[in-house]
Image (cartoon, helix red, strand yellow):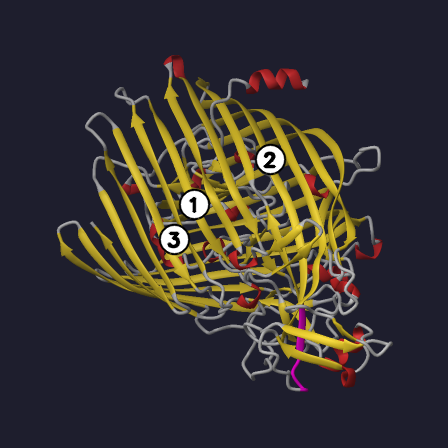
Amino acid sequence: MNKTTIASIVSLCLAQGAYAAEEAAPDTAKKANNVERIIVSGTSKGRVISDTPQSVTSISEDELVKLSSSSQADVLRYIPGIKVEGGGGEVATNLQVRGLPSSGQFQFTPLSYDGSPSLSVFGLNSSAFDVYYRNDLGIERVEFVRGGVSNLFGQGSVAGIINYISKTGSDDPQSTVQMELSDQGRTRLDFATSGPLNEDGLYYALSGFYRYDEGPLDTGLETKGTQLRGNIRKEFDDGSGSFTVYGQYIDDQAQFYLPIPLDGDSRERLSGNDGREVESLQTAQVSNLTYDTANGRYESPISDGVVTKGGSISVVFEKELANDFAINMRSKYAKYQHEFNLFLDGDGIINVPESQDNFLANRGLGDASGAEFSYVNSGVALASDDLLFANRILDRDRPAEDFSAEFNIIKSIFVGDFSHDITVGTFFSHSEADDDNVITTYLGEFNNNPRLIDLTYTDVNGDEVQYTQNGISGPGISYTNQTISATRRALYVADQMESDDWIFDFGVRYEEIEGKISREGSQVVQISDDPTLAPNLQVNTTGSGVMTYGEVDTSEFAVSGAALYRLTDNLNVYANASRGFFFPEIRGIQFNDLGEPASYEAEIVEQGELGVKFFDNDFSGSIALFRTDLKDRRSVDFVNDGNGGVLELPVMQSTKATGVELTGRYDITDEWAVDANMTYTDHEFTEFDSDPSIIGNELRRKPKILFNSSISYTADNWDASIYHNFTGKNFANDANSVELDSFHLFRFDAGYNWQVAPEQTVRLSVGVFNLFDSDGVTEGSPRLGNSQTADNPYFVGRPILPRRVTLRVKYDF
């Protein structure tokens, strides 16, 4: 099929996202064990979880309220087969799914809201998709559907789709307001309201929040923002479908936390110069930091952290037609001003605390007798035994614009004993994003909220020279500027069949992608000839004005098949297999002087699963065996270049993984219930082009064992839950030179409900994240890559966030 043919089909598109077959399960179907919930993600036929020939997880609204704390990680860590790292704070959750290598950022698992992706193309820059949306009280449930034909619909997927489903209005008006108070100065106000707009089938739903927060770690830098989301739905008078408009506006900023130096043996936090345990080396001292450059005075936006401002609008049209035909159309437009400003984990040269003597020696600046370290502004000298920490800030400007659309035609027929729901669909998207980066180095003390340090030293000529100016040691040591766009076109066909005993799903998808890159070169320019300034303060790295333009394109197909057999009234067996693909991140493509790209071929993912689902009134569960092979993966890493800058390093690799997954829930009594899931995965590299010695190693940051459990109590007025997450030991890098210990994470939630009036309820609750204040380490330093080792006095790693207590008052009316 040529591009012209696909383009003509795609021109019919009016919508985007995974097809939603049913809006919600009826109340009688929403049992606590999730067996009867209708699945809406990526199907043309609504099915309950027990009747889907694939692994499915659904988390209800009530559970979301208890689990939501700071980030997507707080919710998603309890889904089987997913490992998430929330140590970075509220955004940029690092998510990995069973069997596939990834440093995170939803690479293989699109993050969707109401079937529409937050952005439709991954890899235009390295921002994670969760920077564009925040969860709020307007979420009805979240579903994780992996495998099967669900991966073929809409935007497509490799490992599955995470879909947050919003509340929509009904004939019964409902409203909620909630106030949340936490330690570290967190205040958050939420609301959600929905109901009818008239008596002719027009409904609304609106939700949003405002919050101010000093962050889960005290850095002196604030976190604040707001979001509004809503939808208006028109149900057709004849009951044949609906038309829904969804909208979102966000203006939010959050701080992002990277690894810090820890004790090399225990991996515990170190004591700073003031004797307090160091939890973060970010500092408000660099707020509004400015310096001269070749292009004028530069002011760093680092104090803003991760900023997202903008919004999206999407429309969904669903209509049943004559002769058992139906259509489903979606479209979405999103545009965001986005910055991802962050503190790195060291200066890219030493990266750990240094004594004053070592700092001078490591940089060839003589000895302490000819040097003076003093606090910026005050001029007060450091104590002679105070440690220093040289660090970098990375300012990243990343505006993004995205349009996507999907059009499906569904035909329902009966052939023999089977009903068939045949879907023919097409998908189109165009995305564009900038990726502008400036790195600045500075010198600070080794403390929480470190003060900046000025250093003067005596050179070989006996002259006094400034090494830092207002704490800055490198005024713009690295510069990148690029714009990347991508266009996707896809066509897919699927048949979902069902009889009394059997369910079969078969589908195929063909897709093309075209990418364009405009990348500016860089140059080092002289900005000063002042002899009292050290050479590092006399130069600045800026754009050269020389642009490299390049284009890439490729195409690939995916095929999936699945079957389920109802063995008994309480036992189903199923199997699925697929051959899928993942288009490499365009940002990692390099071009020669003629503008010719390195090879750009799809990464092939082959998956298979065999499982059993069992269920009755009190118990439900599943057992599944799975296998995943990934071929020709182009992994893009950010690694230190040794001079303070950061390189994007593509590596070609292949992997394989085999494992077992178990889930179960048991309602012990009407009040007590237990829930648990465990995933065991055996995984290894089968190819690694830059270093064959890595073949046979385990995948980085991928534990063999993940285990989650919870126990909950619900009475007339009281409810309480304890959640447990276990992450097994794993390796920090591909070389397997650093092993990270396993750790346990507990959280607690308890509440009391008052019926204050008919259909009016107040709930007062307390939640505790990291109940026992565990010190687990989620990762080493990605920027050290395979060079990081475990036999040093210091270890650069990212601990899980410390304990945090939250009080909530929620009023439903």
Quadrant of residue 720 within the rendered picture: bottom left
Of residues 527 and 542, the one drawn nearer to the viewer in this rendering: 527
Locate residue 81, reporting x and y percent: 55, 52
Q: Secondary structure at mark 3?
A: helix
Query: Vertical placement of 381 versus 710: above or below?
Result: below
Q: Is residue 444 magenta?
A: no
Q: Which residues are magenta?
A: 384-390
Q: Report the amino acid beneath label 3.
A: Leu
Residue carrying label 3: 64
Q: Earlier in the sequence, mark 3 or mark 1?
A: 3
Q: Is residue 386 magenta?
A: yes
On the question of residue 717 being in view, the answer is yes
Give the Cα distance between marks 2 and 1. 19 Å
- Estimate how packed mark 1 is, as few (under 14), some (14 to 19) or many (20 or more) residues with alpha carbons within 10 Å: many
Tell me the mark number nearer the camera, choosing from 3 and 1.
Answer: 1
Q: Earlier in the sequence, mark 2 or mark 3?
A: 3
Q: Report the amino acid beneath label 1.
A: Ile
Locate residue 802, reporting x and y percent: 49, 70
Q: Residue drawn at (65%, 16%), measured in percent from left and top?
A: 4
Contact? badges 3 and 1 (CB < 8 Å): no
Residue carrying label 1: 250
Of residues 494 and 653, the one drawn nearer to the viewer in this rendering: 653
Locate residue 744, reporting x and y percent: 52, 68
Q: Which mark is residue 600?
A: none
Q: Report the amino acid beneath label 2.
A: Glu
Give the Cα distance between marks 2 and 3. 32 Å
Q: Secondary structure at mark 1?
A: strand
Q: Quadrant of the N terminus?
A: top right
Tell me the mark number nearer the camera, choosing from 2 and 3.
Answer: 2
Q: Which mark is residue 432?
A: 2
Query: Vertical placement of 403 versus 190: above or below?
Result: above
Q: Secondary structure at mark 2?
A: strand
